[in-house]
């Protein structure tokens, strides 16, 4: 116990993840002989504690995003600056997603993960309807901001907060007291994040143990080549694309960046939700990476909502996999459609578990593939969801850093200090 107390926060989180995975795998194997122990722990204790933890993170998301974007915009104090930062971030988000999906298509075509796959391995799947592109666009403007907050509609909340921030700036002196109030509320929310973080190791342990106890790694076997293709592309995207951006545009060490991202990555991995991870990502980007608050408070929630590189990678590999299993030949035009649709779909993909798979149906429909194909991969999607969410938030943080750097508001000494933010 005293040994545990000496560990740093990141080490505690990593230990919790490792033990959670080991415990879950053991439990899953015990479950084969005695399912009641597995049921009791994974569907009882772990489920309850894990859900409590995720709920407490989610509890902070709406007020935190609302306050941090409003404060971020007002602290810029200059509307054209805000437009420039927003535009840079959005272009980088779309660009990295397009890279991600192109890399996924190239690797999937080379590896051909669908080869030799038995179609009987499929389970039943009833396709939930993915929203159309036009409805995604229309729904960006909330008709009722309070309802948007109650329902956690992130794009709508972001838009409302942006307009509010602009309005506060335009109002000037008369809005000063409101500005002070919301700035202080923002700080209070960050203190709440610190409180909840105290329970993080326990929460992470339970979430990971539950997933491994109920999933079992043997499910991967029939889909091993699909699983490994997605995993390899996720890794390549981080190691090639992100590292290149960081090294050549950001002029910072990609290794140090990844080291500093560890805690946020574990959170994304255990919750499989970019949204629920926003409080941790924000904290990491500001306090560990040295991104200026006014940039981070805007780019991080925006990224968690519209930037899904990991999800796009899964969608690219899945499309090639499903086409190969159903013996459909995709043309160059189809591949371009996949790149375009998956990049746009990433804007409409909510940062919560499993939505990437629903949006995949939209990509499949665009190129005339059967949506039932999703049934082939649904069984192992949870594990992949965890991994792709980790990549999603790493991409958000990378773009945030590059944007801050280009605005000359990036604090390199914080970035280079290994102890910063701990
Ligand atoms: N779980 C992912 C995220 O929150 C979205 C998805 O791919 O399903 O970023």
Image (cartoon, rainbow, N blue to C red):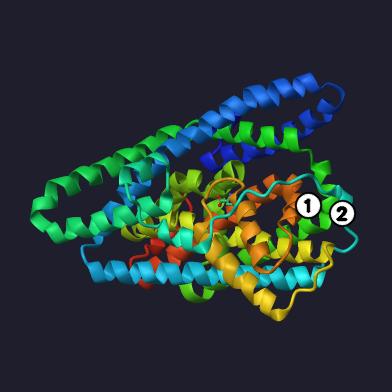
Relative to 5, 227 lies left or right: right
Locate residue 59, reporting x and y percent.
42, 36
Foreground pick, 300 / 106: 106
Q: Which mark is residue 376?
A: 1
Relative to 274, 172 lies left or right: left
183 above or below 215? below
Q: Quadrant of the C terminus?
A: top left
Give the CA separation, mark 1 to mark 2. 8 Å
Locate residue 366, reporting x and y percent.
64, 67
67 above or below 323? above
Locate residue 223, reporting x and y percent.
82, 53
**Is disc 1 placed on a helix, strand or loop?**
helix
Foreground pick, 404 / 316: 316
Locate residue 185, reporting x and y percent.
27, 41
* Nearer-N-terminus badge (1/2): 2
> Do the residues under discs 1 and 2 have CB atoms within 8 angstroms?
yes
Q: Residue at x 51, y 58 (%)?
A: 348
Asked whether the viewer can see residue 232, the reply is no
Foreground pick, 160 / 80: 160
């Amino acid at each position: 116990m005293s040994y545990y107390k000496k560990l740093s926060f990141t080490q505690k989180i990593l230990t919790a993840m490792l033990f959670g995975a080991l415990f879950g795998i053991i439990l899953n194997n015990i479950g084969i002989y005695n399912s009641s122990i597995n049921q009791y722990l994974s569907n009882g204790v772990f489920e309850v504690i894990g859900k409590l933890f995720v709920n407490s993170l989610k509890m902070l998301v709406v007020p935190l995003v609302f306050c941090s974007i409003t404060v971020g915009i007002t602290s810029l104090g200059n509307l054209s600056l805000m437009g420039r930062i927003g535009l840079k971030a959005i272009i980088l988000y779309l660009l990295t997603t397009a890279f991600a999906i192109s890399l996924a298509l190239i690797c999937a075509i080379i590896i051909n993960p669908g080869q030799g796959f038995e179609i009987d391995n499929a389970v039943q799947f009833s396709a939930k309807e993915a929203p159309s592109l036009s409805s995604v666009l229309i729904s960006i403007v909330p008709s009722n901001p309070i309802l948007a907050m109650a329902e956690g509609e992130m794009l709508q909340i972001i838009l409302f907060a942006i307009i509010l921030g602009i309005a506060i700036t335009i109002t000037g002196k008369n809005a000063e007291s409101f500005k002070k109030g919301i700035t202080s509320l923002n700080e209070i929310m960050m203190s709440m994040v610190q409180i909840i973080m105290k329970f993080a190791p326990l929460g992470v342990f339970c979430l990971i143990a539950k997933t491994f106890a109920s999933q079992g790694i043997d499910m991967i076997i029939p889909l091993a080549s699909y699983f490994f293709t997605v995993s390899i592309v996720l890794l390549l995207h981080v190691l090639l694309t992100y590292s290149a951006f960081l090294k050549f545009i950001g002029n910072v060490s990609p290794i140090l960046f990844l080291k500093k991202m560890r805690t946020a990555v574990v959170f994304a991995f255990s919750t499989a939700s970019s949204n629920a991870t926003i409080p941790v990502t924000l904290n990491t980007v500001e306090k560990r990476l040295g991104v200026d608050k006014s940039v981070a408070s805007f780019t991080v929630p925006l990224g968690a909502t519209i930037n899904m590189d990991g999800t796009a990678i899964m969608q690219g590999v899945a499309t090639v996999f499903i086409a190969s299993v159903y013996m459909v030949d995709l043309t160059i035009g189809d591949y371009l459609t996949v790149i375009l649709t998956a990049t746009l779909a990433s804007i409409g993909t909510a940062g919560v578990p499993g939505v990437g798979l629903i949006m995949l149906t939209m990509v499949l429909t665009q190129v005339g593939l059967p949506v039932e194909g999703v049934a082939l991969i649904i069984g192992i999607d949870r594990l992949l969801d965890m991994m792709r969410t980790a990549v999603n938030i790493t991409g958000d943080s990378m773009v945030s850093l590059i944007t801050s750097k280009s605005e000359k508001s990036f604090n390199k000494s914080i970035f280079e200090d290994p102890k910063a933010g701990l």
